[in-house]
Amino acid sequence: MVAVVAGLALVAAACGGGGDDNGGGNASGGGTVKLGFFGALTGPNSPQLGINIRNGAKLAVDEFNKKGGPTKVELVEYDSQGDPAQAPQLAQKAVSDKVVGIIGPAYSGESKVAVPIFEEAKIPNVSASATAVTLAANNWQYWHRVVANDDAQAPADASYITKALKATNVAVIDDNSEYGKGLADGVRKSLAEQGAKVTANESIDPKASDYSSTVNTVKSSKATAVFYGGYYQDAAKLVKQLKDGGVDAKFVTGDGSLDQQLITLGGPAAEGAFATCPCLLATASKEEPSKKFVTDYKASSNADPGTYSTEGYDAAQVFLKAIESGQTSTDGINNWIKTASFEGIAKPIKFQANGEIEGSTIFIYEMKGGQVTLVGPVDEVAK
């Protein structure tokens, strides 16, 4: 009978998910807990929606461990390549690794398929960059994000186009992804509400090399502004082909394309392009916490922080502050997150009941003189 009871105990332990009392960690503090990073570390868009975030998170974890507290944190990386097809398998791996939390997923598409797995396993997750509106409509209890969603960004894009750029005829293009099409659809709706006319509606294949059909459509539409919902790799190709095709319209895009690589890959055609983001780049901020973050980040990663680096740091801090308070089980950490309230590098961190961050300032940036430059908050510069 002793042998049978022991065997049953082993089976129960093997079957336990992230939502048990210990949640893969040590509920009484002490020892080492695993914190996962979920995003693209390889692939075409990895520098922005992966490496930047991971580096910010790694800095936060390294600082935490240097304090010498009773609990150490191991950062476990899950490279999704930004591919939703790979996300479920990686999410299951994270569950089996018994991580106590996930920084990510980084993309909206991979979030859609990975978060239900984390939800079932009761593993809290905090995204630094996934902005699709629909993610907050699933009644998830363990999901959070530290950025405003596309319902805040899309009206800001439309406002900048109509008020600051004075455009009344606008072409709207998307990459047909969960993120890109969602943001572009929001811009289409907001432009109509603000009295502008969408003279061209297009979707492109980001893997294609020739966008001549779309360029011709935009040119014949007589649009004076073009909005693109997608990522910088294809945005750079698009902006070059639009310029080569004789389209002089102002080019505006969202946070997925906000990266120095848009300038590097787009060349002179990217000069004067604009990008919005629910993020404040640390390198563009004059506030003291941002200045210190830039210095510490460069020392840690041998590079300047980029888009969502600060959000990666802040997302990691959500977990680290919970662990520092003595919470090392998944449920304990998740309950702490629900009442979290602290000043992050990027913004104040406090979550609504549905996992959304409170506050929704959207910033506009211009590609100017070969650099990404801050114009300011959209609600201030588009009046």
Image (tube, rainbow, N blue to C red):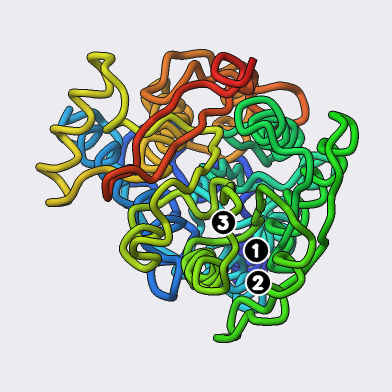
For the point 35% across and 51% down, which residue is it? Answer: 52
- Up-down relation of residue 17 to residue 371 (above or below): below
Pointer 3 local density, CA inside 10 Å: few below 14, some 14–19, many at least 20? some
> Upstream in the sequence, badge 2 or badge 1?
2
Mark pair 2, 3: CA separation: 35 Å
Q: CA distance from mark 2 to mark 1?
A: 4 Å
Is 376 drawn above or below residue 59 in the view shown? Answer: above
Q: Amino acid at mark 3?
A: Asp
Left or right: 181, with 257 as reference point: right
Q: Total number of numbered labels?
A: 3
User: Mark 2 sits on what residue?
Assistant: 84
Residue 361, compared with residue 35, is above or below; it is: above
Give the labeled residue for mark 1: 110
Whether residues under marks 1 and 3 lie with C-beta atoms below 8 angstroms apart, the answer is no
Amino acid identity at mark 2:
Pro
Residue at mark 1 to residue at mark 3: CA–CA distance = 35 Å
Disc 3 target residue: 248
SS at mark 3 in the image: loop
- Indicate whether 191 appears above or below 293: below
**Circle 2 — which element?**
loop
For the point 80% across and 44% down, the residue is 186
Position of residue 272 in the picture relative to residue 283 (left or right): right
Q: Between residues 302 and 228, which one lies in front from this camera angle?
A: 228
Crowdedness near tag 1: few (<14), some (14–19) or many (≥20) residues, C-alpha within 10 Å? many
Kindly indicate whether the residue at mark 1 contacts the one at mark 2 (C-beta within 8 angstroms).
Answer: yes
